[in-house]
Image (cartoon, helix red, strand yellow):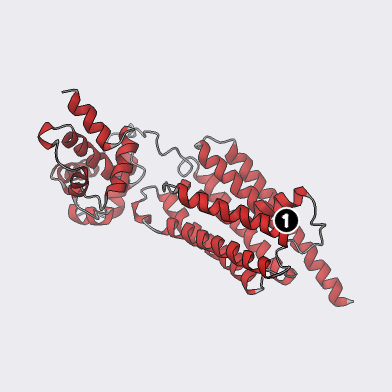
Amino acid sequence: MWHNGAMDRLTLIDSAIRMLAIGQLLLIATVIGRGHAPRAIRIATVTLFVCICAYLTLATPLQIDARGPLWALIQLAAQATPMMLWIFAHLLFERPLNRTAVTAAGIILFGCWIGFGVAGPHANSLGLWLGILQRGTSLAMTAHAILIAFRERGDDLIEKRRRLRVGFVIVVGILAVIVLVIEMIFGFRHTGVGVTLPQALAILVATMALGAALLQSDPDILFDPSAITAPPAPALTPSEHVLKQKLDAAMAGGLHRETGLTIGLLADRLGTPEHRLRALINQRLGYRNFSAFLNHHRIGEAKAMLADPAHVDLPILTIAMDLGYGSLAPFNRAFRQDSGEAPSDYRRRAILQK
């Protein structure tokens, strides 16, 4: 009797935590959805938070009548959480989305969802293999989201977003372990309140941390990367003026062509602390990340070479490699983002107009 009463109280606490987390998620989603961030980021953020709400509902220890089309949609949204987290990480940290990977992930998601509806998630061997495929894919996308947040974090010049990257890694890592790995250990069976309560509590804490970071840092984090940021009005300080002269001289000398150049290496070459160089490039020159600063100089030189009749037969790959790009793909992507057209089209138009 005492045991049943204690379990009932834990179940009520679990439900209260879930309702609190769902309410907070929906409130944050409403604020961000009505904000001024780019539409793609707003849609991804709202969809991600709605999917987390669906998971909180789906994983509740309460006995709910799991039938009908509404419950099927809740299941689909809950299963889509890792994919939306993956997409959210790409958009937030300005990483290009691979359409083939998105399509493959969507096919697996819908295929498993339909398969669960036909076979039942735990009814037979088909349900077991579908569960392994769905959780395995989810774990892979979650791991990639962590990698996106962690990799090239030194390239980010916005201090608030640099801190968010570290927090994002910690939050996502904890949730991935608690939600996905534990589910796989338990064999995809319905788990009791002893497992669901820590899950709900972890999601509530993560929601509070992530929501506070996103809302406090808007628009420093949820900004439009294509928008041009004008340098601030106040004049440079004497030390900033000297540092900018050193930076301009280094760029004029072709230092931007060095393959693998990072802001840390550039700071060493200029003999200045890295944080001072970050502040100059971001707060004074108006660049959101170090890659954008490098691309400004590299693409400007690429345009001059492509428009020069003397270099008309020089392969575009050679130009890209000479300017410090490790391969053709990042050069083409940066060139398109800057000019709106491919390097070959730019060359053809520039040469024929002469």
- The residue lying at 43 percent from left, 56 percent from top is 148
Residue extending furthest top? 353
On screen, residue 119 versus residue 171, left or right, reads right
Q: Is residue 80 among what the camera can see?
A: no
On screen, residue 17 versus residue 2, left or right, reads left
Q: Image height check: is 272 above or below 43? A: below
Q: Image height check: is 192 above or below 309? A: below
The quadrant holding residue 124 is bottom right
Q: Is residue 48 among what the camera can see?
A: yes
Residue 39 on image: x %, y %: 52, 36
What residue is shown with label 1?
A: 57
Residue 61 on image: x %, y %: 77, 64
The amino acid beneath tag 1 is: Thr
- The residue lying at 60 percent from left, 45 percent from top is 47
Residue 203 on image: x %, y %: 63, 59
Q: Image height check: is 133 above or below 57? A: below
- The residue lying at 52 percent from left, 34 percent from top is 36
Residue 11 on image: x %, y %: 79, 65
Number of dots carrying numbers: 1
Q: Quadrant of the N terminus?
A: bottom right
Residue extending furthest bottom? 2
Q: Image height check: is 227 above or below 352? A: below
Q: Quadrant of the C terminus?
A: top left
